[in-house]
Structures are given as C-alpha cells and as structure tokens.
Image (cartoon, helix red, strand yellow):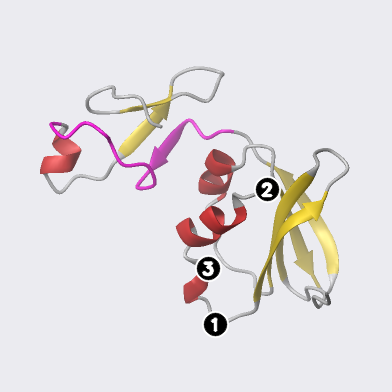
Amino acid sequence: MNIDAIENGYVIDHIPAGKGMKVYEILNLGSLSCQVAIITNAKSKKDTAKDIIKINELIDLNLDVIAYIAPNATVNVIKDSKRVEKRTLSLPSEIKGVIKCRNPRCICNNEDIEHIFRLVDDKGTYRCLYCETKAK
C-alpha cells in the first residue's frame, strides 16, 4: 500500500481501531475536494491496532469532536511536508451538535434548538444541558 506524504494538512493518529470512519463522517471529510486517506487497523505500538486519517489540506478542524470520539488521538499539523505541531487532545467540557439527546420529551428534540451536552465527570460522561439525559 502506498499513501503519499502530506504537504500541508493534518494527520489524525491514534484513533481507536474501527472509529476512523465515524471521525470521517462527523467531520464531513467526504465533502472536501482535497485528498483524504483513511487507514484502518494499522499496526500500533500502544494498542494492537489503530486508525489514521490523513488530510492533505489545512482546513478548520473541530478538535472537540475528534477528542469526544477518540480522546487519546493526536493531531499532527503538517506544513511544507514537515510536522510543525503535535496536538494532544482532551475531552471537551461541552459538545454542540454532535450527540443527539435520547429523551424524546427533551426540548431540543421538539424545538429548533441545538443539542448541547456537558462533561459531568472525569470518566467521560456527558449529559444533555436541557434534561440531564446521559449520552451513549
């Protein structure tokens, strides 16, 4: 397998195996006109396998979404074919428009209101801002 080097863009590394497509879909990377490579089940020194996403363009990335799906992921910023920055992620205190509330009576499911979830503990538990329903 041959995947070209990134000139200017990002390498999202250490995504848990099987979660790469979810990151791809939620970030809407399919709508980009640049090259995007998804590598699944790559060998990993930390885990048995990992997913990697390479984006060959400097775009506006929602790091909070990546951190929610893959809290141990890293984002490498590439400029002129060299890594200029390595960002480690941490769980965001608030997530907007990514998780949908499971409570059918919640106001966000019955009105035109953005779904907002807040981190409530250090275990990664998120609850709806409006009704306190726990996210999956």
Q: Which residue is mark 1?
A: 33
Q: Is residue 47 left or right of residue 90?
A: right
Q: Dot 3: within a 10 Å radius of its alpha carbon, few (fewer than 14), some, or many (20 or more) residues? A: some
Q: Residue at x 55, y 43 (%)?
A: 69
Q: Dot 1: within a 10 Å radius of its alpha carbon, few (fewer than 14), some, or many (20 or more) residues? A: few
From the top left corner, tell me how far across and down residue 53 is, in percent.
68, 61
- Give yes or no for residue 64 being in the magenta stretch: no
Q: Which residue is mark 3?
A: 29
Tell me how far mark 2 sits from mark 1, CA to CA. 25 Å
Discs 1, 3 touching: Cβ within 8 Å? no
Q: Is residue 43 left or right of residue 21?
A: right
Q: Residue at x 48, y 30 (%)?
A: 93
Q: Which residues are magenta?
A: 91-105
Which secondary structure, mark 3?
helix
Q: Is residue 14 left or right of residue 57?
A: right
**Residue 13 seen by the camera:** no
Discs 3, 2 touching: Cβ within 8 Å? no
